[in-house]
Image (cartoon, helix red, strand yellow):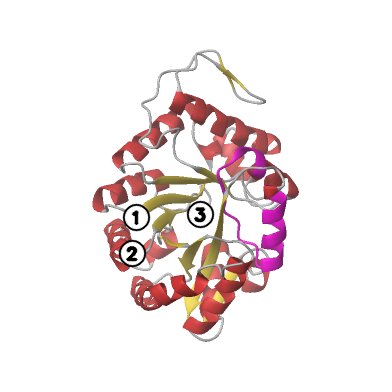
Amino acid sequence: MQIGLLLPAGQAQLEAGGSVGDIVDIAVRAERLGFDSVWVGDSLSRARVEPLTLLTAVAQATETVRLGTAVLMPAYRHPVQAALTLSSLDLVSGGRLILGVGAGFPGRSEHEFDLAGVNFKTRFSHLDDTVALWRQLWTGSPKSFHGKVLHYDWLPEVPRPAQPGGPPVWLGGFTPAALRRAGQLYDGWLPYPPDPADYASGLATIREHGRDVTPALFATVHLGAGTAALEEYCQATYQAPLDWVGQIQVMISGGPDELIAQLRRFVDAGARHILLRVAALDPRVIDHQLAGLAEILSPLRRTLEPESP
């Protein structure tokens, strides 16, 4: 059972008084407090510190904590150049990189794909081709690559990552197509469905395809009574109300016991790596929340350990 922390790297957090140095300090503190991983998000429409650049700084400041993307949008980067960047980051970090990847959200990501010059209608094929290309570049010296949408008649050599075969690649997504592809092509699954029953059924579908994936969960939390903090965070981050966001993502507020109880439902459904995002913008609030989470980290991990059959 592992627990991670999403780093507050969005423009909203920076405008509330944070800095890039503060973000790196939070990663260092999370490592010292016992978190297993730290993560960064990716977006073009919601301004944030570029995730791979930030993780490079975090890699230099930390020693053991795993470094993840939740999630990286490969379509926004040239596939070959991204393979080089990711391999280099894995080397810089000593083999601590985990790549959560996604293909965008209908109704919200189309303009980002247009800007990147990638056809949104073929986004899944583009993602799968990109990951397949990365793996070939990380494990050998292919002379060419021809997938469904990506075609290269010449390819450069890329330094081998620290992790044999390259960093593990986890797929974000919950559609039937995403579940099928996660079970066939990816190393892990990083969704955020609000209903544990849906998580369990999705994981069962993935396992029907035979791959032994790491079952993870992205959950937004706030230690404290009421949902006002969640509402404020949703409005600032998504310009949407909690009622809408909560139908799509795991959103939990309450005391330590309530937080543990809610997360336990997803552990019982099969989750084994829980990524916590603090629903706060103000650096002082984030610091207070992190301190509160640290106090319950050990009991949280013990409580969340899956029960023996």
The residue under the point 31% across, 43% down is: 93
Task: Please tell me which of labels 3 and 2 falls first in the chain.
Answer: 2
Give SS at disc 2. helix
Q: Viewed as shown, does residue 180 lie left or right of 151? A: right
- Label 1 sits on residue: 65
Q: Position of residue 70 (x, y in %)?
A: 50, 52
The residue under the point 36% across, 74% down is: 294
Picture quadrant where residue 182 is located: top right
User: Depth check: 121 or 167 in front?
Assistant: 167
Give the CA separation, mark 2 to mark 1. Answer: 8 Å
Residue 145, disc: none
Give SS at disc 3. loop
Q: Which three-letter amino acid code belongs to the residue tagged 1?
A: Val
Q: Which residues are magenta?
A: 183-206
Residue 30, disc: 2
Give SS at disc 1. loop
Q: Viewed as shown, does residue 265 lie left or right of 299? A: right
Asked if labels 2 and 3 touch by Cβ distance under 8 angstroms, the answer is no
Residue 232 visible in the displayed image: yes
- Label 3 sits on residue: 46
Q: Which three-letter amino acid code belongs to the residue tagged 3?
A: Arg
